[in-house]
Image (cartoon, coloured by chain):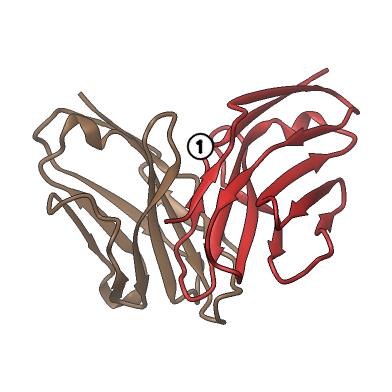
């Protein structure tokens, strides 16, 4: 069975600094998708970034980028120039081709210090 | 475009009572999903609707949980009777049916507390 592990329950970063959130996963599939979702307090959970496993190039979205290491089954999220609005719970998720089911990690709470 | 909405945002009930959670997906999204996060743990899949049909309900914990999606629009998730272990945040998500590459859009969740 596939699993997703986020080993950092909580992280802090100074405003304008860079922070990296870790995510590892376990699967025997070769074709799958990985996601980072962000949930600000009491608000909608929104997609931050997604990565197709068949793509070697790491996905980027403005200040957000991933380090996708397929062989190591690692999918970390780097947030550059952190802003107060980045404070949220971040969830890493996995979905294999052929299923709509997402498998999530336990989440990392990110605090941004002014 | 309105996002996925869920009602209520919070619900506190006594053990043995019944609670109904509602989810309104993004207009035009045929796929609707329910997930649950028990405190401190991962978000777990409960079930998946395509329009009004249940495609996958493998994550439903037991027969105290009943999900419906009448007319293929909004969905309800009823818990009857509620137990202490049902406490958690219930998320709803929706997606268009454009193949597996489609992204799921999540609602803010309903926080259920069973006392």
Quarter of the image where the N terminus of chain A is located? bottom left
Near-viewer residue (A3 or A77) = A3
Question: Up-down: is B36 above or below B87?
Answer: below
Q: Residue at x 51, y 80 (%)?
A: B97
Labels in figure, total: 1
What is the drawing colour of chain B?
brown
- Is the residue B63 above or below the residue A40 in the image? below
| Residue at x 70% of width, y 56% of height | A71
Residue B109, image quadrant: top left
Instruction: Give the letter of the chain under mark 1.
Output: A
| Quarter of the figure with residue A111 | top right
Residue lying farthest to the top in this orientation: A114
Screen quadrant of the C terminus of chain A: top right
Q: Which residue is mark 1?
A: A106
Query: Which of these two is toward me, A32 or B95?
Result: A32
Mark 1: few/some/many CA within 10 Å (<14, 14-19, 20+): many
Tell me the colour chain A is drawn in.
red
Residue beneath the point at 84% across and 64% down: A57
Asked if residue A34 lies left or right of residue B39, the reply is: right
Q: Would residue B86 be found to the left or right of residue A24 on screen?
A: left
Please state the horizontal and vertical placement of residue B67, each as a whole percent of the image. Answer: 24, 60
Q: Residue at x 87, y 52 (%)?
A: A62
**Residue B23 x/y as whole percent:** 38, 57
Q: Is residue B108 above or below residue A110?
A: below
Residue B108's place in the image compared with B54, above or below, is above
Rendered image quadrant of residue A49: bottom right
Residue A81: % across, % down:
90, 35
Tell me the element at label 1: loop
């Amino acid at each position: 069975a596939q699993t997703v592990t986020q080993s950092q329950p909580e992280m802090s970063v100074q405003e304008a600094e860079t922070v990296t959130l870790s995510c590892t996963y376990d699967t025997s599939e070769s074709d799958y998708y990985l996601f980072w979702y962000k949930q600000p307090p009491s608000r909608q959970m929104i997609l931050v970034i997604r990565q197709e496993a068949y793509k070697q190039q790491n996905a980027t979205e403005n200040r957000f980028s991933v380090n996708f290491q397929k062989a190591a089954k690692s999918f970390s999220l780097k947030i550059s120039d952190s802003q107060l609005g980045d404070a949220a719970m971040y969830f890493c998720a996995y979905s294999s081709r052929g299923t709509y089911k997402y498998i999530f990690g336990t989440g990392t709470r990110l605090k941004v210090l002014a | 475009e309105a996002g996925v909405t869920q009602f209520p945002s919070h619900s506190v009930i006594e053990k043995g009572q019944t609670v109904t959670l509602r989810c309104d997906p993004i207009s035009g999204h045929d796929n609707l999903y329910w997930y649950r996060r028990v405190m401190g743990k991962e978000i777990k899949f409960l079930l998946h609707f395509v329009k009004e049909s249940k495609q996958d309900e493998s994550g439903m914990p037991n027969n105290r949980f009943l999900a419906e999606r009448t007319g293929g629009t909004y969905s309800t998730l009823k818990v009857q009777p509620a137990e202490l272990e049902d406490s958690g945040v219930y998320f709803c998500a929706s997606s268009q049916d454009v193949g597996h590459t489609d992204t799921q859009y999540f609602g803010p969740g309903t926080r259920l507390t069973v006392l």
